[in-house]
Structures are given as structure tokens and as C-alpha cells.
Amino acid sequence: MPLGSAPLLRVSRHGRRPAIGRPAAVRVACSSRAVLWILLVSCVAVSCSAVHRPPVTLHTKSGVVRADTQALAVDVGDELDLVYPHVRDALVGIRDLPPEVWVVPEIGGAAAARPDTVGGVFLVPDDQIHVRVAWEPPKSFAETAEWAEHSRRLALAHELVHFLLDESWRTLPIVAEEGLCDVLAARTVAPLGPMARGLQGGTALRAFGPVQVTVMFAPAGRQLGPMHAVMLAAPPPTAHLADVFARRRVASDIDALDGDPWEAVHRALGFVVVSRILERGGIEGLHALCVRARDEGLEIVPFPWLAAAAGLPLEGERSEQGPTWADAWAAACLQLMDTATHRWIAMDFIDLAGDAVGNERLRRSLTRQLGRDLDGPDDFLRAVEATLWISLPGLENGIRFLQYPPRRGLAIRLDELPGFDALVRAAWRDDSGAP
């Protein structure tokens, strides 16, 4: 069964019954979330000749930093000395070579600049790490203290994993290598670890069908209420799991990781697989697969080896973790989205929550359930429980349908999260036209 092979859904809003059919009352999106986690680009075949060589050079305990100013070189040098020992100690099969880090205004230089959301790159031909001076965060994370303080370290940790892997890792598929970099970066930069787990788990979930995202406002004490839904589309049914994990780390191929709107889904699958392998067998277990493939004359670790090490079924196999192999993989994605990740997941969909608060039809449905009008945002906050659902549609007789509440997914109480009060007041004010 190819990834994402599922019929489209017609989603009704505001508490009406869902129905199968063509997508009508729902926004089917390949939105920014489809590429949200491609924030850390891996090794690319780009020569540093396209990038201005920073004039200031600083030698640190861990390596060399080049930047445009002494102050910037010192800042990044301190971050390098903080991050490098953690990444090095988390790996086996590493190179004994100090890293060279360039701090640049644009990744790839002016002629081939990457988007502002790309925080770093490892240049294979030049054996250099480039990190961006200022890394633009996803919109909803812009004002979080964790992002402001730790985001460049996250990029640096990711690229250091690429840099440190020696030839014994050469048979690791590139999607799995990206997964390893993201997993170890999330572990190294602990304040952003929940963000990584939550967004990677949610992105990988899309490989197994369109993901339903619903904001529901229920009168306090009631299970259901008016809903505002969006469907995040699944990848087209062209790639199988084995195909996703079939690409080697070859420098001339790496640009294929850029530009494909579904590459984030594939990379997130790498995060899921590597996370589970490290939990079950440690870094030594993953490395042993690479060494075994090399010793047996294989160019790449076979996907069945990776799936077995991760405790996940192959496509079409029966599984104790769910009625189908896809259910087992979806369950693995959801396991990453633990309570610590809910704040970040909710922030990722904060615009959807604001749209729901300002939706006039939804408010009318809510007042009918309450039996009275809502007297402003404070009354709304007292009277209503807000929940964000992230789920896969149900499957019955081969037809996918929506479930309320969803059986496969997670529920996040929005009204219990910091900042929800301010969101409601702002959305109410925008909708009313008040200054």
C-alpha cells in the first residue's frame, strides 16, 4: 500500500455530521506545515566559493569559528564548545577532526540562498558547517524564550552529527541520517526537544492518510460542541516506505532533499525510525546495522533491517500494535507526541484556533448550545472548553471517515495552555472591529 493512499474526505464543520465525498467544507492543505521541520538542511553539494569567507577567525576548544565580527565569533564559539562534547559523546564511529564553522548571513550565498527557515548546512566537498547569523523561526514560535536562546544550537548540533559520522556510517540511508541528526540535536538541546518530537511525530503521521486537525469549543462539562476543521493532505500514493529509505548519502544527490513538499514527511519518518532504534538498541545498534551492511557488500542498509530494529512491521504485515501495519506506524508517531510536546503542537496550529474563535457561524452554534448569548471574550473563556484534536480518520470497510471524538489521535486542551486567553481576546477584538 503506497503512502498516503486514502480517499479524500468531506468534512462538515460546526458539529454537523461528517460525510464521505469530495472535499467541500474543509481546507485541504499542503501548507507550511508540510515543510515546517525542514529547518536543518543536511549535506549539500555546494562549494564554499559561492559564500563570502568571514574575516574573523577564532580557535576554540572544539574547533574553528569564522564570522564577520569578533563578538559573533565568540558567541558561536561558546555555543560550539557547549554542543560539541554532547554530540561527540552520543555517537560511535566518529572522525577525529575538529569542525570548522562559518557564521553566514545566508545559507548557500547570495546566488543560491536557502530560505530564512534553514538554520544550517554541512558542505560535503569543503568539510565545513555553515550556520546562519539569524535563523527565522516558524511564525508561531517567534516569541518563545526557548527558540530565541537555543535555536542556533539546534542547527549546530544537527550539522555536527553529519560532520562527525565516519565512513562506517556510509550505508545509512540519507532519510535515516537526517533522522539521526534531528534526534540527537533534540536530545542535545533539551529545551527544544519537545518541539522536535511533537512536530516530527505529527508530520510523520501524514504518511498514513490525511490528518484531521479540529478545534472544538464545547460548553463546560459537555463532550461535544461546534467544530472548526482543517485536513492536512497526505503525500500522493507514489512512494512506499522501502522507497523512502532507499536513498544513499551521496553528495550529488542531496539537493533532492530540497524543494519536494513531501520531503518533510519522509524526514519525519526517519526521525520516528531512528528514535525507536536508539530506544531499543542504542546508538551501537544503529551503527551495527551500517557495519553489517558494509561487511556484506551492500550499498545501503536494507529497510527490513531498520524496521525490525525499530520494532515496526513492513507494509502489509500483521502487527500486535494495531489492526494493520499502518496503524502500528501511526501509533509510533503518536507516541512521540507526549504531554511535553502539546504546547508546541498547539502553537503550530494557533492560527487555526484564532480562526475558530472569530468564526461567526461557530459562535452562533455555541450560543444555541449554551442557550444564551456570549458577553465578550471573558464570558467565552469562562463558559467554554477548547480542545485541539490531531487524528487520522477512521477506517471501516476500506472507507475512511471522521470520528468525533477521534479514536486514533491526541487531544490537547487549548484553554489550559498559556496564551490562550490572549488569543481569544485578540480574535474577538479583530472580529468585532474594536480598536
Image (cartoon, rainbow, N blue to C red):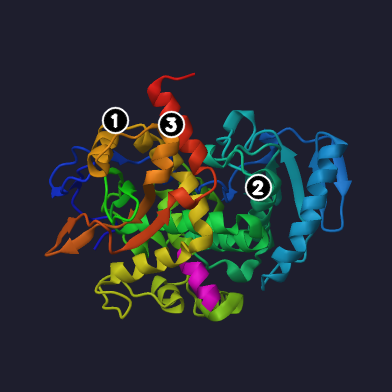
Label 1 close to label 2 by CB (< 8 Å): no
Residue where numbered disc 2 is placed = 151
Is residue 294 visible to the viewer in this orientation of the structure?
no
Q: Residues within 10 Å of mark 2 (few under 14, many from 20)?
A: many
Label 1 close to label 3 by CB (< 8 Å): no
Mark 2 vs mark 3: give the one in front. 3
Q: Residues within 10 Å of mark 1 (few under 14, many from 20)?
A: few
Q: Main secondary structure of the magenta part?
A: helix
Query: Residue 75, which numbered label?
Result: none
Q: Amino acid at mark 3?
A: Ala
Whole-percent x, y for residue 428 in the image: 42, 30
Q: Residues within 10 Å of mark 3 (few under 14, many from 20)?
A: many
Q: Amino acid at mark 1?
A: Glu
Residue at 26% x, 78% y is 318
Whole-percent x, y for residue 7 in the image: 18, 51
Q: Quadrant of residue 104?
A: top right
Q: Does the stretch in magenta take in 140?
A: no
Left or right of 319? Residue 430 is: right
Q: Amino acid at mark 2?
A: Ser
- Magenta-colored span: 272-279
Residue where numbered disc 3 is placed = 427
Residue where numbered disc 1 is placed = 360
Whichever of callouts 1 and 3 sits on the residue coming sooner in the sequence is 1
How many numbered circles are shown? 3
Q: Quadrant of residue 182?
A: bottom right
